[in-house]
Image (spheres, rainbow, N blue to C red):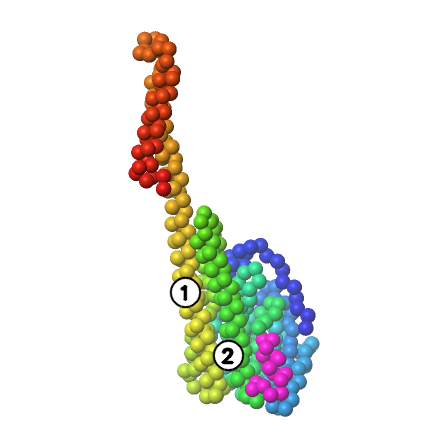
Amino acid sequence: MARRKRKKRAPFQGLLSQVSKPFRRPSPAAGQPGVLVAPAGAPPPHVTLICYDASSIDETTLSRPAELEVLKQTTSRIWLDIDGLGEPVWIEKAGALLDLHPLALEDVVHVHQRAKVEDYGRQLFIVARMPSYEEHLETEQLSMFVGDNYVVTIQEGRPGDCFQWVRQRLRSADSLLRQRGSDYLAYALLDAVIDGYFPIVERFGDQLNQLDEQLSELNSRVPLGEIHRVRSELLLVRRAIWPHREAINHLLRETTPFITPEARIYLRDCYDHTLQLIDVIETYRDMCSDLRDFQLAAAGHRANEIMKVLTIISTIFIPLSFVAGIYGMNFRYMPELEWRYGYFAALGLMAIMAAGLVGYIWKRGWFR
């Protein structure tokens, strides 16, 4: 499947857009609930339908919304993946065929949703944030509907996703995905999303270790903005992963016919992964604070060393300047003015004063 190329952005552009991106709804205020309006610039969808059971699998790429009628005809379990929000007619058609709640469909195109779980009686609606990292951190909204024999996933349409291993496991005849129900597929997709955060967090750990090593080196200078960048992106990861803990805990705690007790056992492992990620992120944020304090302390120490050197030089030359100023005055009647050895005597006096000050400073240990 051909993927669209990602446009290159300037450094920190993605970070700033995540922090200061204005909140805008594609639909007008006080509009009719359930009206779907595609976000501005949303790409056209790439739709894949996978019908599978324990003995067979049929993977098809759909080109027209009318082809979704097969959802009512098949008796196999279904995974419908809509990758792109540019044509809401696909979402409307799938919603009509599977009786998806219109308020949930409205949340699909409002891509500012945090991770959550909502039970609409006829299906579960799950929102997750799918991460990606090239030059900076980005998250993509993943909307998921879980029913008796189907799972519908709707992505924003950014290049790539984290479901490659899930698709490969589905194609394997001896995979548990082929044997279990739609709730196990939903778990596998959620687990893939959560596991997608681990390489990103590990990358931040490597960056912090490099910054720590650089700061530990003598006379090393690390830009304070680099530490701030890592800390800000860790904050974005924390904001993205924290609601996942509540969402998965909701699936574990609440009783629903769409999640079997067997699937809850696997969801507990997914919940543990979210806790582990949160703990590591908090540790790395503390490391960023420690590195920032160390960097400021090192900068202050270097400034003190510079002021120390300048103060020592000034201390040595102030009395010499005093002597030079005395004998530089243009009074007619001055002692030693006509003395033959006055110049050499003045230089000698300056040298003695300078040597005395240097010896005193050396004795006090101020040169160390």
Queried whether the magenta region covers residue 340, the answer comes back as no
Queried whether the magenta region covers residue 173, the answer comes back as yes
Mark 2 Cα shell of 10 Å, populated few (<14), some (14-19), many (≥20): many
Secondary structure beneath dot 2 equals strand
State the extent of the magenta-drawn residues as a range: 163-177
In this view, the residue in front, 301 or 105, is: 301
Magenta part, dominant SS: helix
Q: Amino acid at mark 2?
A: Phe
- Vertical arrangement, residue 347 with respect to residue 23, above or below: above
For the residues bearing labels 1 and 2, Cβ distance under 8 angstroms: no
Total residue callouts: 2
Residue at left offset 51%, top offset 59%: 15
- Vertical arrangement, residue 263 with respect to residue 324, above or below: below
In this view, the residue in front, 74 or 320, is: 320
According to the picture, the residue beneath numbered tag 1 turns out to be: 283
Residue at left offset 64%, top offset 81%: 49
Nearest to N terminus: mark 1 or mark 2: 2
According to the picture, the residue beneath numbered tag 2 turns out to be: 125
In the figure, is residue 143 to the left or right of 67? left
Please state, as top left, top right, bottom left or bottom right, where the N terminus lies in the image. Answer: bottom right
Please state, as top left, top right, bottom left or bottom right, where the C terminus lies in the image. Answer: top left
Mark 1 Cα shell of 10 Å, populated few (<14), some (14-19), many (≥20): few
Q: Whole-percent x and y of residue 279?
A: 41, 69
